[in-house]
Image: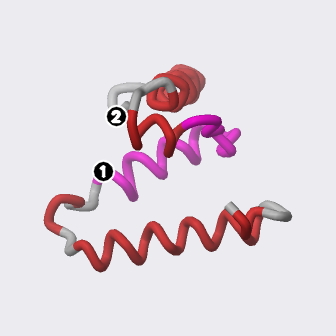
Amino acid sequence: MLAKDGDELEIHYRHTLEELGKRSGMLGVIFRKAQNKIQDPAKLCRLIVDLIDKEQWSSLSADVKGDAYEGLLQKNAEDVKGGAGQ
């Protein structure tokens, strides 16, 4: 995704989410019905390049990853009415 920009990045990201949702096992369950809520390709690029790619994810402890995941779940529950039950 780092090599893509603009609409091409947004399209690639959307297709990646769709393909991950088709996978078997837990990965497919996690990404099933995933949607790109970031409509501005520039913001998507900034998220990927400036935030996600800069982090050394494999060096983070399980506690940090768990806290990040719980934070995302909480944010989703706040953003979507009735999301707290998911």
Total number of numbered discs in the rendering: 2
Is residue 56 rendered to the left or right of residue 31? left
Kindly indicate whether the residue at mark 2 contacts the one at mark 1 (C-beta within 8 angstroms): yes
Looking at the rendering, the stretch of residues picked out in magenta corresponds to 32-53
- The residue lying furthest to the front in this view is 25
Q: SS at mark 1?
A: loop
Q: Amino acid at mark 2?
A: Leu
Label 1 crowd bin: few (<14), some (14–19), many (20+), radius 10 Å: few
What residue is at 54 percent from the left and 43 percent from the top? 44
| Residue 35, horizontal then vertical, whole percent | 65, 38
SS state under label 2:
loop
Please say if 3 is above or below 75: above
Q: Which residue is mark 1?
A: 53
Quadrant housing residue 32? top right
Amino acid, disc 1 = Asp
Question: Per the image, is 39 magenta?
Answer: yes
Crowd rating for badge 2 (residues with CA inside 10 Å; few <14, some 14–19, many 20+): few
- Give the distance between the C-alpha atoms of the residues marked 1 and 2, in whole angstroms: 8 Å
Q: Which residue is mark 2?
A: 2
The residue that appears at 65% across and 44% down in the rendered structure is 38
